[in-house]
Image (cartoon, rainbow, N blue to C red):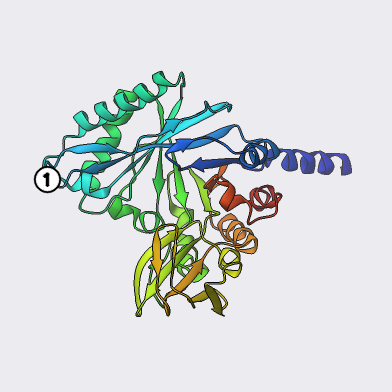
């Protein structure tokens, strides 16, 4: 009897595979640093989700056009490339929206980029924060895109689209990717708008009822919120507290808040005396917390954990084992 129990235990242990690690690449020029390549190697990454272009609506002509298409300074030496197309919701709200036409043009432009760079793909991801007003057009676009592309299709899913899926509906895709970040409002007095466990707790229990298989996207980026005269005047990406600690122009006044002590320009932005920078980011402890909370609420284990985004400026803020630690938490 003890051998049977031991055998069942071993089978159960073998049946639980840890999610694989993947990354988003969100720059307009594809060129990996040695540090980024080493990160991919250390984490046995064989899949990159690369932003190919955005789709926006021209303010005057009302024509949909691609914004900042990717340029490959080097060809990715990785097994699976997934083009990601970010679509502004206003594209889906346009009165002249033509789903089949837009799907065809999008497929053609992806194919053109792939052909130019001798790349191929089996999957394409659509990233769009659709709304109740745009859901009809968005869902039809997904149908047309899937039919025309003949590819596996994934789509990003926000927490509110999980909780209210009976109203927002579910796109007809092969898999969804839950974007577990950008949860709060960018404001002077708000908590961390990138990740807040309290905000997440309002939605996370709904995951058990969500019918679509989900992979998980987690944040490893940070930014500074530039505040002047009590108002937010802009986001300053790729900025950390340690960056400002090294600068003589700033002084720390709170755990994540820095005051400008001397007027100056920094990367083309003018900072006046008395302005503040509020740093928002995600710690290693936050990532482990996210994994634990999600594990207890997902209907099924994710196949992939995708970190946003692959950039030396982000990766340097973590111990190199954090990605495996986080994936193991699922």
Vertical placement of residue 37 versus 236, above or below: above
Vertical placement of residue 309 versus 243, above or below: above
Q: Position of residue 124 (x, y in %)?
A: 41, 32
- Residue at image location 48% in from the left, 55% down from the top: 180
Q: Position of residue 63 (x, y in %)?
A: 16, 38
- For label 1, the residue is 60
Which quarter of the image is occupied by the N terminus? top right
Count of numbered labels shown in the rendering: 1
Q: Position of residue 150 (x, y in %)?
A: 36, 22
Judge by depth and name the residue closer to the eye, 242 or 43.
242
- Residue at image location 68% in from the left, 49% down from the top: 328
Query: Position of 140 compared to 45: left or right?
Result: left
Query: Position of 191 compared to 85: left or right?
Result: right
Vertical placement of residue 157 versus 113, above or below: below
Judge by depth and name the residue closer to the eye, 276 or 283.
276
Q: Helix, strand or loop at disc 1?
A: loop
Query: Position of 308 compared to 97: left or right?
Result: right
- Residue at image location 39% in from the left, 75% down from the top: 188
Judge by depth and name the residue closer to the eye, 114 or 268.
268
Q: Position of residue 323 (x, y in %)?
A: 65, 49
Vertical placement of residue 128 versus 34, above or below: below
How many other residues sit within 10 Å of disc 1, few (<14), some (14-19) or many (≥20)?
Answer: few
């Amino acid at each position: 009897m003890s051998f049977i129990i031991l055998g069942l235990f071993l089978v159960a242990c073998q049946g639980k595979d840890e999610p694989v690690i993947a990354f988003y690449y969100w720059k307009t020029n594809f060129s990996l640093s040695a540090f980024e390549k080493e990160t991919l190697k250390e984490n046995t990454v064989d899949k990159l989700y690369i932003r190919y272009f955005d789709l926006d609506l021209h303010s005057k002509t009302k024509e949909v056009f691609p914004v900042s298409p990717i340029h490959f300074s080097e060809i990715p030496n990785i097994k699976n490339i997934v083009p990601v197309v970010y679509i502004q919701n206003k594209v889906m709200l346009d009165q002249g929206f033509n789903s089949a036409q837009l799907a065809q043009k999008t497929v053609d432009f992806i194919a053109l980029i792939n052909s130019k760079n001798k790349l191929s793909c089996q999957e394409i991801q659509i990233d769009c924060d659709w709304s109740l007003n745009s859901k009809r057009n968005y869902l039809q676009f997904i149908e047309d895109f899937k039919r025309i592309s003949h590819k596996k299709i994934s789509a990003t899913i926000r927490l509110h689209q999980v909780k209210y899926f009976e109203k927002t509906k579910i796109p007809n895709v092969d898999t969804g990717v839950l974007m577990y970040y950008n949860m709060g409002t960018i404001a002077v007095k708000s908590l961390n708008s990138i990740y807040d466990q309290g905000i997440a707790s309002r939605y996370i229990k709904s995951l058990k009822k969500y019918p679509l298989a989900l992979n998980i996207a987690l944040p490893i980026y940070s930014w500074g919120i530039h505040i002047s005269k009590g108002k937010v005047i802009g986001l300053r990406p790729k900025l950390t507290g340690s960056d400002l600690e090294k600068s003589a122009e700033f002084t720390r006044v709170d755990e994540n808040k820095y005051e400008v002590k001397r007027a100056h320009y920094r990367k083309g932005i003018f900072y006046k005396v008395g302005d503040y920078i509020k740093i928002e980011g995600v710690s290693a402890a936050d990532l482990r917390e996210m994994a634990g909370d999600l594990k207890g609420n997902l209907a099924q284990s994710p196949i992939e954990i995708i970190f946003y985004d692959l950039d030396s400026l982000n990766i340097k803020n973590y111990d190199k084992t954090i990605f495996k630690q986080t994936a193991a938490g699922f």
